[in-house]
Amino acid sequence: MDTCDMPTAYGSAIYAGHRPVRDAATVTLTRAVGAVMLGKTVTTEFAVFHPGPTTHPHHPGHTPGGSSSGSAAAVADFMIPLAFGTQTGGSIIRPAAYCGVVGYKPSFNTLPRAGVKPLADSLDTIGTLARTVQDAALFAAGASGYHDLILKNDPDTHLRVGLCKTWEWDECEPAQQEVLLQTASRLARAGFSVTDTLLPQPFSNLAAAQLTVMLRQQFQSLSDERLNHWSALSPNLRDTLARGGQIDDSSYWSAVRLIQQCKALFQDLFRDVDVLVAPSVTGEAPEGLDYTGNPIMNRIWTALHGPALTLPVGTGPRGLPTAVTVAGLEGSDIHFLKAAYAIETALAKHDPT
């Protein structure tokens, strides 16, 4: 994200010392409402998979996730109260879950993307990381100009919640599956209506379609770096770009059509529920710093363009944070944030510890 008063290197040595001439639109809007930008945090290389030097704030031998690794770690470590993040696959939801903070990915284009280096133009989304839903919403309101996103202290007590295991359920470790089931039980005890919600069969291929679109579009977006600075790219990124270059037109457009089909089907689910709760990650943050974790549980929410939010719900068997995802319908952010706040409030009142 470009800043005129601080270097913006996009996580790459190619842009070491790069000083943009103006701020990204979100930065300008946030400064205009009185925010102070304390600094820049570490991202993975071009917000893809090659990690930076950031470690997990609670367990330094584990990854903080990515690509918004520095943002999640800094908020979790109480260095800062708020941070920007970006998500093209799972780059807000996953690091927020690993580090134990709230990560809010708004509906597509709620926060303006001008001044943010593109990766996959139909997926790139700017969001916020904070320690509470209210703070994440307040920050998003300031960074977008949509002040209706600001939450009042009146959580909804008549919420309809869909328990959504998703088609990727078997990717989750048993402990992570139990996190979701226990969270649903706690919400039911809090008085919410909780029902199982099944995603239609086309959703079984949605995560793969998201990956296809992302790989092909980032192959295009990073054309200058790929064609003119190949030797300066990490082996991880070279492999990723090579995969994108192998995707043929037919496969790409089939993936685009599947995403559109799923977006249409998704609307029908919200006749009976207000929001969904689903797994945020496959398990606790993996050990080691050479891998930012598996984004498989996040891909579908990015493809659907609706809001998604990481909600911390305790610690797992290895002592690292655990979380669930709250997901909603595109354009429902005001209602969605109220629902996420209500869930956060209810879980705090019915904490099993």
Image (cartoon, helix red, strand yellow):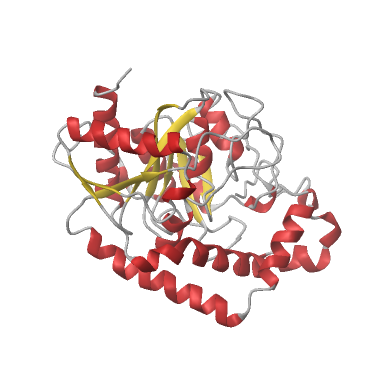
Q: Residue furthest top?
A: 353
Left or right of residue 269, residue 250 in this image: right
Percent coordinates x, y for residue 277 in the rendering: 32, 45
Looking at the image, residue 289 sits to the left or right of residue 35; the answer is right
- Location of residue 296 in the rendering, given as x and y in whole percent from the top left corner: 51, 52
Relative height, residue 22 to residue 228 (above, below): above
Viewed as shown, does residue 104 lie left or right of 80? left
Q: Nearer the viewer, residue 239 or 115?
A: 239
Q: Is residue 21 visible?
A: no
Q: Is residue 200 above or below residue 29?
A: below
Query: Front-most of 303 and 222?
Result: 303
Question: Considering depth in this image, is 330 or 37 the residue closer to the camera?
Answer: 330
Q: Is residue 79 left or right of residue 228?
A: left
User: In this rendering, is residue 276 above or below 317?
Assistant: below
x and y percent of residue 196 in the render?
Answer: 24, 49
Picture quadrant of residue 341: top left
Residue at left 22%, top 31%? 153
Q: Quadrant of the C terminus?
A: top left
User: Which residue: 44% across, 37% down?
Assistant: 174
Q: Splitting the image into 4 quarters, where does residue 190 fall?
A: top left
Spot occupied by residue 327 in the image (x, y as percentages of width and height): 34, 49
| Residue at image coords 28%, 29% | 347
Q: How many numbered marks are there?
A: 0
